[in-house]
Amino acid sequence: MNNKISAVAKAVTLLLATASTAAHADLVITEYVEGGGSNKAIEISNLGDSNIDLDAAQYAITLYSNGSTEAGNSSVLTGNLAPGSSIVYHNASAEDQFKVGIESTVTYFNGDDALLLTKDGTIIDRFGKLGEDPGSEWTDASDANFSTKDKTLRRKASITTGDTNASADFPGTDNQWVVFDKDTSDGLGCPGEGACTAEPGVLLITEYVEGGGSNKAVEISNVGGGAIDLDASVYTLSLFGNGSIEAGNTETLTGMLNAGDSIVFHNASAEDAFKIGTESTVTYFNGDDALVLFQDGVVIDRLGKLGERPDGAWTDPNDANFSTKDKTLRRKESVTAGDTDAGADFPGNNNQWVTFDKDTADGLGCMGESACGDTPVVPDPDPETPCSGCDELTPVADPATFDTNVYYTNVLTGSFDDAEAMKNAISVAITAGHTQLSYKQVWTALSHSDEDPANSSNVIELYTGKSVSKQNNGGNTSDWNREHVWAKSHGFPSESQLGYTDAHHLRPTNVKVNSTRSNYDFNECSDTGVEVAEAPGNYLDAAARCFEPRDEVKGDVARMIMYMDTRYQGNDSNMPDLVAVDRITTADEVSNNDPLHGKLCTLYAWHQQDPADATDAQRNDAIYTYQGNRNPYIDYPEWVQAVYGEQCGDPLNPALDVDMIIVSPEKVNEGESLTIDASATVAADGAELTFSWEQTAGPELEFDATSAVLALSAPEVSADTQLQFTLTVSDGSLEATEVVNVTIENVPLSFDISFSGNTELNEGENTVITAAIANEPAGLTYSWKQVSGAQTDFTATGLVLNLTTPEVSVDQALVFELVVSDGEEETSASVSINVANTLDDGWSENYSAGSLGAGLLLLLPLLWRRRQS
């Protein structure tokens, strides 16, 4: 029990170590669902009266399983949370009614797992007791209905601040939770004890225009009761042309979409009446092409039948007017849920669409079956944000005042035993100040870090080298998107993980080229692969799982991979230890999200071929501005050799190539002679060698330090002792060293000791016992002590013992021990003196036993006979 308490205390101490007085009291865990199967969810709400900027600090919800005090799965809260609003995390395999908010592995809990809500590492609320495994659930002795298993629990309306004592009993004497039946889901998405009064948002395709020429548009609307945070999941609209099941042009939906609001994508060449919303190539459809709306890759609505190409258009035998060609279609107002079976017949037996004449445009921009009213819907204004759907970012650091000597002081002033120790020190430096960006904020960061120096409205794509408009970011094949240079499937597949949004390895990349690169390792494969059509100079060998970027950015790629390998050492709560390996990773390793990426020594060579330049420095400064940390291998390119050179055959201090042959005993007894012979050592190129020995452990010995052979005498030791010598051989320019260990074994002190003198005495007699030691060395000391027998007066000088035997009532032996010492060890021998009891004068034995004695004598024969019988 004490061990458990200590473990909990330790964990809580660690969580509080970075305590901030700004821990937000209004952010509270308000609902917990532990239902059947994977029906798991957790709700966090803003119970205050002011907005919470979740990006201003590191807010996270973390799972602690089975009584562990080690953090498990975690989700980072991002965005702004208005008063009375909630964030919900649900299990990916939950039933649909529980799929409110964001899919997250933090919901991999059972009734005996704890959850902690933290801000910058400080606990601001908790569910369960940290460090305790209650068995299968926490219960309440005062409420038989309460359980953390097979129940939905909502925070009482009277609770407005979090429970920050993670090691206290749960739910405690003041239970803060209201209990609902298993699989109750109607309260997810809003705080309070009751069900949510507003329905969640529902995203549908609500209008489709296939008109004359390029008059094409598609409208997507939120027909539900609440706003939809389109950045909380990946919402995409994809075009599938001519019966294909491979997605073509794609748009990614971003921002907040309030209930009743719509998003419109139109063709760039359409007439002005159709130019509502955003220009997009997803409108490159005809009547025989399908559109599919996805959330995190799952179909949530569709128009047309995926995998089918009708003859010109889809039609409805029950409605001669219906057609997907030369018509405008609006979704019926009665439809409140998406059509998720993309492979079903279209429009099916229950046609959900109202048909309007060709080139009807007056309903674009508002959901419903009618026109949008008297107020015309005007096209979106010219973008004012850094890129399409981007937010402005607030700088967190100033490159103008950056001082490398201060930022890297622990590296520049450190003394390191090896490259790994130096890498660890660099990691500490570049971890400090790192502010996690949301994935949406990465768009903005890249619009600054990869800005075209010749055109501030453009960014430079990594693999193509093309300068493209910042506003052309998104999911269309002609757009640029966010390329994870260290592929996210190599260790951090979740958007909540730090590496997922680390801008130091994220680059603008053409959508199609990004897809081509996939998650392959980097290596030389131009000879065996094929050149990427959309990005000449880049090569792919899919069979070898290899991608080779163009020469101009090979060094960039290398330094980004090395940054990731150095930054993430397994010290962040939601990131593994990333390792750059000198091989191609396997498909199974990638499938398992193993945190490995290759190929290290190829990247090392690329770093040397394509050194860091002014473009790298500008990018480093821009990311430092918005993320707060730096890539050390741009600031100090020479550190690449110091950290990785040894692994790649280019050590910072190369060693002499020598065949080191040293003949030496492993063990030798103290006092014996020994020889350590290195005379057979030769240089690989036959160069003449010099020898230099240094004793680095054990009692100091004298020897010729420049000889190839050491002739030594093992010193006297009181216990087994190791001698250690380091041999350095040199050809005059390079050196090689070897360490030799020899154990000196202690030989226990032992002598041949004999005793002379009278050892058979009567009581009261004197004797002198003299000890003799064969081959007695000088410097010994002696002491005598009596170890048994009647207490005896004695004196001792050196090896001589004088004593007078005491009076004894019966014969007995007196034992004396001689202890011999050489100052460090001692040995002993003992001598026994036999003392006989003598009768006093005039005393004689009385053989008369009286009448009792006589009686006993008479009984003796009888007793003897009974004994025989």
Image (cartoon, rainbow, N blue to C red):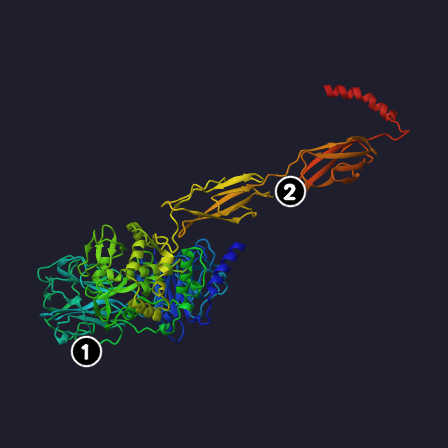
With respect to residue 430, does 771 lie above or below? above
Mark 1 lies on residue: 378
Near-viewer residue (250 or 297): 250
How crowded pointer 2 is (Cα within 10 Å; few <14, some 14-19, many 20+) is rated as few
User: What percent of the width, then of the height, locates residue 466?
Assistant: 21, 66
Mark 2 lies on residue: 825
Instruction: Between label 1 and label 2, give the one nearer the viewer.
Output: 2
Q: Is residue 498 left or right of residue 376?
A: right
With respect to residue 137, does 321 lie above or below? below
Work out which quarter of the rendered image holds the C terminus and state it. Answer: top right
State the count of labels. Answer: 2
Q: Amino acid at mark 2?
A: Glu
With respect to residue 772, does 62 lie above or below? below
Q: What is the residue that sits farthest to the right in this orientation?
A: 842
Mark pair 1, 2: CA separation: 102 Å
Place residue 419 in its image quadrant: bottom left
User: What percent of the width, then of the height, locates residue 581?
Assistant: 33, 53
Query: Quick one: label 1 or label 2, which is nearer the N terminus?
Result: 1
SS category of the residue bearing label 1: loop
Q: Confirm whether residue 107 shows in the render.
A: no
Place residue 748 in its image quadrant: top right
SS category of the residue bearing label 2: loop
Near-viewer residue (131 or 762): 762
Q: Confirm whether residue 637 shows in the render.
A: yes
User: What percent of the width, then of the height, locates residue 760?
Assistant: 78, 29
Q: What is the residue that sits farthest to the bottom in this orientation?
A: 374
How crowded pointer 1 is (Cα within 10 Å; few <14, some 14-19, many 20+) is rated as few
User: What percent of the width, then of the height, locates residue 39?
Assistant: 34, 58
With respect to residue 320, does 525 lie above or below? above
Near-viewer residue (332 or 756): 756
